[in-house]
């Protein structure tokens, strides 16, 4: 009796030890290499946080920072499209003693003096996505850009595959002269020859990424051009309101090379049968750009290993010709299924 | 134009003097629109094609409706800068509350109207009873309204319900439904202003509040009503935009503030208050919208598009400024 009791105890101890060991290895595996041992706090600074894309991005940044146990605090500030406020947000966060700052510098080079002063004060600061000028190691710790030219190349290659003999294209981007649109155009032109004709004014039709302006611009272009073979846009969901204009004028919606969004995927799902020419190709809209920027900032602040990637490359997401299109009709249209953040978490982020 | 007046200044009756500016503002805006349409037919025929018009008229209708709202306030010598927040709030209330559920659309629309009336009362009380400067009061209320926009939406757009998209974005007898809304708003505003006692008093108060007070009119009440009615019109415009653009942003009103003032001025209403010209305002809305469609269809660069619009506006305002000086000199001569 005594003997069996001891045996049981021994087995239990062994089992506990095994479980403990398993737990510790799992914990080790979960701590990423970019997370070092030094404690630090991190802040994400948005220039303009008022849309679902930014909310999903903010939630993604937070989730990435939480992977590292050395990060003891995560803060967020929204510049609300006001350059002055964005600048004082950066200085305020630094003055509060935050160790690492990840900055979406919407105002571009206007943000550089504030970024430089924080860097000179010994903080880790990582601007991402929007080019603010300056140099790495002199004005900031690291700039994590996104390769918009690669997006243009991906679209160009797909257009070549569906229209091998060339065709008429319409390229829409955001505010006049934005560098994202210009980089994308360079990517498109590197792949497509002169047989692919741009119908829009050089370098792209200005839409400010505003659905109402997009609708006006598209109205004019549809009336002007009898034959539009493909529309290229770097903000797919803003087209959803304008695409029914084709059906109103008795034409099929043309092929679309753009970035993803749940509302767009669902629009394709509902309308592709009635529109024989409506093919859809999307690149990931790039919410995960922030993850790489946070990784760099955390690595520099906590003494972790710097990530190998230096620039964010948006993967190809949907292709209605050779793959499939995703739609979650049960969730809000303003989420991005290409994001690493789960669809349910995004829905929470955009409906809170 | 001046030659027609000068030989007969003494023969002009009081009534004739009043009806002349009406004819001029109406004729000017009609003539500009006809010239624009001819220019469209020659340089950019696609911009006046049926498809282009059915796509762009809804936006002209929205500008017309906010223009009519701004007209009422301008007639009282005021200026309503809360338009941007008001339109945006109507957009987010009518898209976020139903969240795709058609059954919730009517309560949401009623709630948007309720907010509009509250905002109008706030503007009106501040301006007419507390005598605050209209620009300052309406900027403050605009900030409050944007607070509401963020509270409802968090700044995030949401897709319109299918019912609202059908009502605001659909067509009846080949004409966009929003055009009917604009015409209805025009009929109501014109009838009220020109054919009812309240409307006649309203214009009299706007033309000269002191004289109106001396005549025993309730000046403050008329001024208050201008802000309330304007808000209701902004609200209608906001709900229409929510239906016309499938996924409107939470800041859709921002781009309407300037056009709303522009169409009032192009329509010939003096920014100093007084007589209003609803029909000319609505035609000016069509003119302004068609002008931007024209610039888009010609395919000029974005910079040139903005310059063309600015020039047209400057031209429009210039035409009326010249007329004002002519009137002033004739009046001085008479005295």
Image (tube, rainbow, N blue to C red):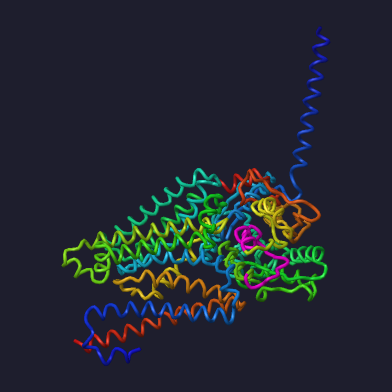
| x and y percentages locating residue B92 in the rendered image | 50, 53
In the displayed structure image, the side of residue A325 where residue B151 appears, left or right: left
Picture layout, residue A29 above or below residue B36: above
Q: Is residue A282 visible?
A: no
| x and y percentages locating residue B198 in the rendered image | 25, 61
Count the labels in the image. 0
Q: Residue furthest front?
A: B173
| x and y percentages locating residue A145 in the rendered image | 70, 63
**Which of the pair A161/A249 is nearer the observer?**
A249
Picture layout, residue A58 above or below residue B49: above
Q: Is residue A134 magenta?
A: no
In the displayed structure image, the side of residue B326 where residue A107 appears, left or right: right
Q: Is residue B79 visible?
A: yes
Quadrant occupied by the C terminus of chain A: top right
Quadrant occupied by the N terminus of chain A: top right
Image point 72% across, 59% down: which residue?
A278
Part of the protein shown in magenta? A223-248
Q: Residue B78's quadrant in the figure?
A: bottom left
| x and y percentages locating residue B207 in the rendered image | 26, 71
Q: Is residue A228 magenta?
A: yes
Image point 18% across, 66% down: which residue?
B213
In the displayed structure image, the side of residue B248 where residue B197 appears, left or right: left
**Which of the pair A56/A172 is nearer the observer?**
A172
Q: Residue A260's quadrant in the figure?
A: bottom right
């Amino acid at each position: 009796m005594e003997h069996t009791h001891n045996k049981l105890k021994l087995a239990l101890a062994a089992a506990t030890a095994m479980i403990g060991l398993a737990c510790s290895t799992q914990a080790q595996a979960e701590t990423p290499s970019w997370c070092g041992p030094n404690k630090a706090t991190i802040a994400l600074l948005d220039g303009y946080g008022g849309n679902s894309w930014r909310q999903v991005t903010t939630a993604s940044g937070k989730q990435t920072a939480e992977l590292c146990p050395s990060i003891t605090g995560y803060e967020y500030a929204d510049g609300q499209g006001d350059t002055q406020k964005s600048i004082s947000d950066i200085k305020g966060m630094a003055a509060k003693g935050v160790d690492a700052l990840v900055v979406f510098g919407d105002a571009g080079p206007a943000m550089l003096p504030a970024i430089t002063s924080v860097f000179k004060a010994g903080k880790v600061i990582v601007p991402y996505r929007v080019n603010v000028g300056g140099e790495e190691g002199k004005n900031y710790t690291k700039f994590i850009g996104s390769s918009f030219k690669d997006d243009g190349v991906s679209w160009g290659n797909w257009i070549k595959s569906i229209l091998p003999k060339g065709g008429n294209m319409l390229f829409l981007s955001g505010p006049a002269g934005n560098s994202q649109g210009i980089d994308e155009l360079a990517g498109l032109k590197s792949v497509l020859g002169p047989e692919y004709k741009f119908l829009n004014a050089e370098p792209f039709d200005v839409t400010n990424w505003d659905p109402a302006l997009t609708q006006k611009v598209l109205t004019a272009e549809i009336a002007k051009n009898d034959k539009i073979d493909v529309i290229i846009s770097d903000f797919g969901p803003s087209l959803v309101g304008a695409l029914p204009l084709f059906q109103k004028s008795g034409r099929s919606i043309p092929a679309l090379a753009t970035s993803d969004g749940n509302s767009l995927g669902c629009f394709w799902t509902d309308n592709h049968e009635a529109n024989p020419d409506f093919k859809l190709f999307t690149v990931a809209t790039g919410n995960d750009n922030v993850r790489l920027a946070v990784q760099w900032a955390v690595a520099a602040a906590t003494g972790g290993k710097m990530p190998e990637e230096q620039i964010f490359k948006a993967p190809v997401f949907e292709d209605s010709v050779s793959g499939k299109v995703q739609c979650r009709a049960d969730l809000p249209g303003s989420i991005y299924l290409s994001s690493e953040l789960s669809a349910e978490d995004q829905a929470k982020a955009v409906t809170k | 134009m001046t030659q027609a007046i000068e030989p007969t200044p003494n023969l002009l009756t009081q009534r004739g003097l009043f009806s002349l500016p009406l004819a001029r503002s109406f004729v000017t805006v009609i003539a500009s629109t006809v010239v624009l349409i001819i220019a469209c037919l020659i340089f950019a025929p696609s911009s006046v094609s049926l498809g282009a018009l059915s796509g762009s008229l809804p936006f002209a209708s929205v500008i017309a409706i906010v223009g009519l709202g701004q007209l009422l306030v301008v007639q009282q010598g005021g200026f309503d800068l809360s338009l941007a927040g008001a339109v945006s709030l109507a957009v987010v209330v009518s898209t976020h509350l139903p969240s795709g559920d058609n059954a919730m659309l009517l309560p949401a629309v009623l709630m948007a109207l309720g907010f509009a009336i509250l905002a109008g009362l706030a503007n009106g009380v501040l301006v007419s009873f507390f005598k605050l400067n209209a620009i300052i009061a309406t900027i403050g209320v605009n900030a409050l309204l944007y607070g509401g926009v963020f509270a409802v939406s968090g700044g995030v757009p949401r897709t319109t319900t299918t019912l609202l998209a059908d009502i605001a974005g659909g067509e009846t007898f080949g004409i966009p439904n929003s055009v009917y809304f604009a015409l209805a708003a025009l009929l109501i505003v014109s009838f009220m202003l020109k054919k009812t006692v309240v409307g006649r008093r309203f214009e009299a108060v706007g033309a000269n509040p002191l004289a109106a007070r001396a005549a025993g009119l309730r000046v403050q009440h008329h001024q208050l009503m201008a802000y309330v009615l304007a808000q209701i019109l902004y609200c209608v415009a906001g709900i229409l935009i929510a239906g016309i653009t499938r996924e409107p942003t939470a800041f859709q009103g921002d781009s309407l503030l300037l056009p709303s003032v522009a169409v009032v001025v192009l329509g010939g209403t003096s920014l100093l208050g007084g007589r209003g010209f609803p029909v000319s305002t609505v035609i000016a809305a069509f003119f302004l919208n068609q002008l931007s469609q024209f610039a888009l269809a010609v395919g000029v660069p974005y910079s040139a598009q903005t310059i063309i619009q600015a020039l047209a506006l400057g031209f429009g305002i210039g035409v009326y400024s010249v007329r004002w000086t002519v009137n002033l000199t004739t009046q001085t001569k008479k005295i």
